[in-house]
């Protein structure tokens, strides 16, 4: 299935994409991994959303990790508002919500434990966003 088009991403935002965002989208489309380091508020989330959308369109999973539970909870709420309750799950030391959802938000520690345990949850994984 096709990845989201550049135009569909641009249409979501009321600003023009920066070169680093366009370069990252091109790299994702080419099947490359992407590392984005930029200041707060510079538009890194747009790239993460593009990668998540691509995973969903391929009927695969996307993991979004944050270093602490509070940030995981905040991102969970943000993603639920964007994608809908049925599409997003949360997995932290304290919470386990809709863990079979295509988009799963977790702490980095939970992801590490999944990798060490060779969890079956990794089988359909297309993208990991490390925030």
Image (cartoon, rainbow, N blue to C red):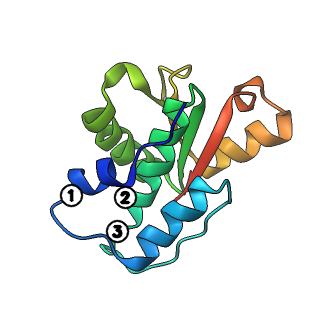
Q: Secondary structure at mark 2?
A: helix
The vertical placement of 70 against 43, above or below, is above
Identity of the residue drawn at 52% across and 77% down: 37
Compare residues 100 and 21 and report the one nearer the observer: 21
Give whichever of discs 3 and 1 has the lower sequence position: 1
Q: Position of residue 120 (x, y in %)?
A: 77, 24
Quadrant containing the N terminus in the rendered view: top right
Query: CB under 8 Å between callouts 1 and 2?
Result: yes
Identity of the residue drawn at 57% across and 30% down: 58
- Residue 29 visible in the displayed image: yes
The vertical placement of 44 against 116, above or below, is below
Compare residues 32 and 30 and report the one nearer the observer: 30
Q: CA distance from mark 1 to mark 2?
A: 9 Å
Mark 2: few, some, or many residues within 10 Å (few <14, many ≥20)? some
Q: CA distance from mark 3 to mark 1?
A: 10 Å
Q: Position of residue 99 (x, y in %)?
A: 54, 23
In the rendered structure, find residue 46 and report the number of the disc placed on it: 2
Query: CB under 8 Å between callouts 3 and 2?
Result: yes
- Residue placed under numbered mark 1 in the picture: 13
Q: Which one is closest to the eye, mark 3 or mark 1?
A: 1
Mark 1: few, some, or many residues within 10 Å (few <14, many ≥20)? few
In the rendered structure, find residue 121 and report the number of the disc placed on it: none
Identity of the residue drawn at 65% across and 39% down: 126
- Residue placed under numbered mark 3 in the picture: 43
Identity of the residue drawn at 56% across and 38% down: 62
Give whichever of discs 1 and 2 has the lower sequence position: 1
């Amino acid at each position: 299935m096709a990845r989201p088009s550049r135009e569909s991403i641009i249409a979501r935002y009321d600003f023009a994409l920066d070169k680093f965002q366009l370069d990252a989208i091109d790299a994702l489309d080419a099947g490359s991994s992407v590392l984005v380091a930029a200041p707060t508020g510079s538009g890194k989330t747009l790239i993460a959303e593009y990668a998540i959308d691509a995973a969903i369109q391929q009927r695969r999973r996307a993991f979004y990790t944050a270093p602490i539970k509070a940030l995981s909870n905040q991102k969970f709420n943000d993603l639920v508002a964007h994608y809908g309750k049925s599409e997003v799950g949360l997995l932290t030391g304290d919470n386990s919500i809709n863990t079979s959802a295509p988009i799963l938000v977790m702490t980095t520690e939970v992801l590490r434990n999944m990798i060490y345990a060779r969890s079956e949850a990794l089988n359909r994984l297309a993208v990991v966003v490390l925030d």
